[in-house]
Image (cartoon, coloured by chain):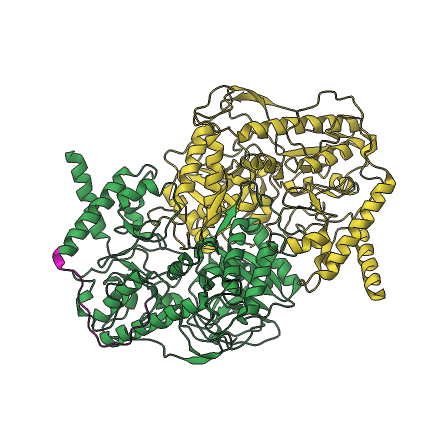
Chain colours: A green, B yellow
């Protein structure tokens, strides 16, 4: 028993020592490929900073996803809990975590207790509690047994004292919407279904489920954000796989030199990492498109842009150059739909359009048949096709989205068949407007951060003027003595991605705007308190 | 209307012209990466060869998957249908296909009518009819509308005159088993479930569903084919992705030369193709392990071996060398389980263990934590994790398999809870024994083919002596004038994979033994008729 006590205390001590760590980027290295043993910035004792915020937040209504935007931006907030309560919660939860570690049946050496823990770029700190199936927080000890057969619930739920991880664009904000839709997006898969490698032997993309193809085309017609007639639809394991497939398809197989892959900075941090991690002889990362010199290239055009939300056009033009348009965020919740895009290769993903990141389904709209064939070949060699279960699920989800806007009448809450409408883009835009308002107020209250200016445009989908509400905040720390904004925020237990990973200054960070309400609320509250 | 008629006739003519094509390999090229416009061998008028077989087959019971092995190997078969009937069926179905093409709304240029059709290594001839949900053949014209929302059913159903495609190891043989299991392997996924990228932030493999991890370990304990204690379980989009992940993890990032990847010939044709298609600077294909000279290498050990079913050990040994054990076929339906494998890296897949190829789920058992971390990093950069829907489905499927053998009593048809047992490995072994018996009889009846000799061993799982019944037949054509066995068989509308793709002689082909009953029956019937 004394031994058990000592091990519990040791684990708690190790947890405390690594509390500010997690998967924050090392700002000296732009690539995500190589991991580094980051020096962890010290955590301030009151890093939660709840008391100092001079900005309107949702206060106690953290789990109510339906609240409207509060306009009284000057109202001040109570801290919410006394230091004694915080301490009690922390100790209780820490003990739970420590016990869970000891009871863990499987892992030969537990990651959290291992010294190389902090080197995992994308393996996160085990947090103080986890969200159970009904969305309520459950102690880890209890969950260890339940989780063995229950589906996972994503990152742990947060408390006022948690490390808030906004490094990835984990789109759990959308869970609240899908909980409201009943069985509209539910699927049932019998044991014998879709066992074959093949989905449609008459299609260039022979592993594409016809039902998914159909719903992709229908949704684009409904939204008006991309042309589909005359295009091949290809499916990938997320759009990342299709991005690699496009590089493979557009790089000549017998060129002496690898094709240069470029994008205007700040560019999505995965572009250089994914392009270069296998050191392909077919293509290699060429950096910022604006400083590229040459005729042959593949330009990645992300619009709205990850990380800064800017609307982008291709920067380069040449007969030997090719463009890949990453339109993951070209949906009405994030930006006005100003035109029907009709580029040669366009990439989309359910991760950002509907929030189903765990489903790992992306799609490409491709004009040229030979390019479509080569991209298909890549997916065949890489993973011999794409999960049919997830394609079927994604088809059902996209169908539910389109169904929300069929025979669209103004303010018509019920469809012609009498079912209550669930409108994803209405939900998404409402949430994004609300969150951007909260974030701008928090930045103003703090006084040391700046954000990109809001832009607006006419949205053809909603037939109204709408603002650009990006899925990420591209936040700049203006304080003179802070050269590494990600490190500064990590010191306050906010994990973000460092500007240097996007080919930009380390005074910038990218912050996900798509996490659950509670995490977002704690984030803006903390941000507002930083001076 | 006259125009319509002309287009229908034109399409039928093009179909006839390409009827013998499909995705057969070009025997001059061992790699699957580059496609070739194969010269299509002429199809003999009576290529179905049903009348000439002197070998016992299931005759009219083509859809009955439960029939036992017929022992009367001398009984002769009727041809089954008159030439007039064949002609009528063919014309009817061809018109259906042609009409379906004209009615196809989406594809800008239909693949089957396109001149580069035959260059697609893995896009197959559209066949004469398709299998509908209940397994019955449905005309393509009818299905075009149904399939738009219904899940796919794999390759088209076959008729006595079809091209029989046994190039891939499409494991549809197992559908019959899973249809019997009711809801034991059925899953329901609500719209809001598993939306996050993350499954278990405390695991090295942070996208691994805990329930899948648990069922993988349970099944290996049940079967006794691999050690799991002290191992990390990693999940991949099929085992192909984990194969690439292993190459990435085992290749030093800063070596001057790419790591050599080798395997004893005949080796799985995907090994060279997948190793080299991106021309990685980290690793490259080094050919047959037996002719490799050097100290640093990655040796791929496939056992039972694809394509020839041989039981393999590593051929090389050196301190700087690494081995990856591909144990996709080390399951009781294919081979006696003679020992609990405990190699450093072992790869498995549901495609071959349970037949769920469309689910694209593989797993790795990995001893070393750093290797597990690097493999996880590969999957993160390649596809940001693995479909959670398919992980949940695979977990349910593996659970159903293990449940069949819990508290195993001799001949106990019902479990202790009163439910009827469904035993996958019993089904699988019965089918494989039956099929190998049929194939050996067909080869003997033909007189121009030879097969590997049958080997036996003591199976610890069934506690009995069992034969090796490989998932592929490694077939040699002994006729002096046939140097290209795949081309010869393609001339008789049997698609197989050429020996040269496996680093072997073109007199050999690999033939899938896992297709549906009807396709397998037509195959052995045709094979027996070849002289």
Closer-to-camera residue (B115/B281): B115
Closer-to-camera residue (B124/B135): B135
In this view of the protein, can residue B45 be seen by the observer?
no
Quadrant of the snapshot with the N terminus of chain A: top left
Number of dots carrying numbers: 0
Closer-to-camera residue (A2/B301): A2
The stretch of residues the image draws in magenta is A67-84
Closer-to-camera residue (B68/B170): B68
Give me the residue at 38% from left, 44% from top: A150
SS assignment for the magenta stretch, majority: loop
Q: Residue furthest right?
A: B84
Q: Does the magenta run of residues contain B480? A: no
Question: Where residue A506 sits: x, y (%)?
Answer: 32, 69
Give me the residue at 66% from left, 46% from top: B132
Quadrant of the snapshot with the C terminus of chain A: bottom left
Task: Using residue B432 as the reference point, say whether residue A424 is left or right of it.
Answer: left
In this view of the protein, can residue B308 be seen by the observer?
yes
Question: Where residue B403 sits: x, y (%)?
Answer: 46, 31
Question: Where residue A129 sits: x, y (%)?
Answer: 27, 50
Question: Where residue B119 sits: x, y (%)?
Answer: 71, 54
């Amino acid at each position: 028993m004394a031994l058990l006590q000592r091990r519990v205390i040791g684990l708690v001590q190790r947890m405390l020592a690594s509390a500010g760590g997690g998967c924050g980027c090392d700002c000296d290295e732009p690539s995500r490929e190589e991991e580094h043993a980051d020096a962890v910035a010290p955590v301030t004792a009151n890093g939660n900073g709840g008391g100092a915020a001079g900005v309107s937040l949702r206060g106690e209504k953290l789990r109510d996803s339906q609240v409207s935007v509060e306009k009284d931006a000057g109202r001040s907030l109570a801290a919410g809990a006394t230091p004694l309560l915080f301490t009690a919660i922390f100790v209780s939860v820490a003990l739970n975590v420590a016990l869970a570690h000891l009871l863990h049946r499987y892992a030969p050496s537990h990651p959290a207790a291992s010294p190389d823990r902090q080197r995992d770029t994308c393996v996160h700190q085990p947090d103080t509690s986890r969200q159970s199936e009904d969305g309520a927080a459950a102690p880890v000890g209890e969950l260890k047994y339940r989780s063995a057969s229950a589906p996972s619930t994503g990152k742990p739920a947060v408390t006022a004292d948690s490390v808030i991880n906004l490094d990835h664009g984990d789109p759990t904000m959308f869970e609240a919407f899908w909980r409201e839709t009943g069985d509209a997006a539910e699927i049932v898969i019998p044991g014998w279904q879709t066992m074959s490698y093949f989905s449609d032997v008459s299609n260039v993309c022979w592993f594409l489920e016809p039902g998914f193809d159909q719903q992709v085309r229908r949704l684009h017609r409904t939204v008006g954000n991309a042309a589909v007639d005359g295009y091949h639809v290809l499916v990938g394991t997320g759009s990342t796989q299709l991005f690699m497939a496009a590089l493979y398809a557009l790089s000549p197989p017998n060129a002496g030199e690898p094709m240069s892959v470029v994008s205007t900075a700040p560019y999505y941090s995965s572009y250089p990492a994914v392009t270069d991690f296998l050191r392909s002889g077919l293509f290699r990362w060429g950096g910022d498109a604006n400083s590229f010199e040459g005729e042959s290239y593949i330009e990645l055009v992300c619009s709205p842009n990850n990380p800064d939300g800017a609307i982008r056009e291709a920067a380069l033009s040449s007969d030997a150059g090719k463009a890949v348009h990453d339109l993951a965020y070209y949906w009405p919740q994030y930006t006005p739909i100003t035109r029907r895009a009709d580029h040669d290769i366009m990439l989309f993903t359910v991760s950002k359009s509907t929030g189903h990141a765990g489903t790992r389904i992306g799609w490409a709209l491709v004009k040229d048949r030979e390019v479509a064939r080569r991209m298909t070949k890549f997916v065949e060699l890489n993973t011999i096709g794409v999960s049919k279960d997830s394609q079927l699920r994604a088809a059902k989800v996209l169908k539910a989205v389109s169904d929300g806007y069929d025979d669209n009448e103004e303010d018509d809450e019920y469809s012609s068949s009498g079912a209550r409408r669930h409108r994803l883009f209405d939900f998404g835009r409402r949430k994004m407007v609300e969150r951007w308002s909260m974030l701008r107020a928090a930045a103003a209250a703090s006084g040391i951060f700046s954000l990109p200016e809001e832009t607006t445009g006419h949205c053809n989908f909603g037939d109204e003027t709408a603002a650009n509400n990006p899925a990420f905040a591209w936040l700049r720390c203006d304080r003179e003595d802070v050269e590494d904004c990600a490190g500064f925020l990590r010191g306050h237990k906010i994990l973000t991605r460092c500007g240097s990973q996007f080919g930009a200054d380390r005074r910038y960070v990218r912050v996900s705007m798509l996490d659950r309400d509670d995490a977002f609320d704690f984030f803006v509250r903390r941000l507002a308190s930083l001076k």
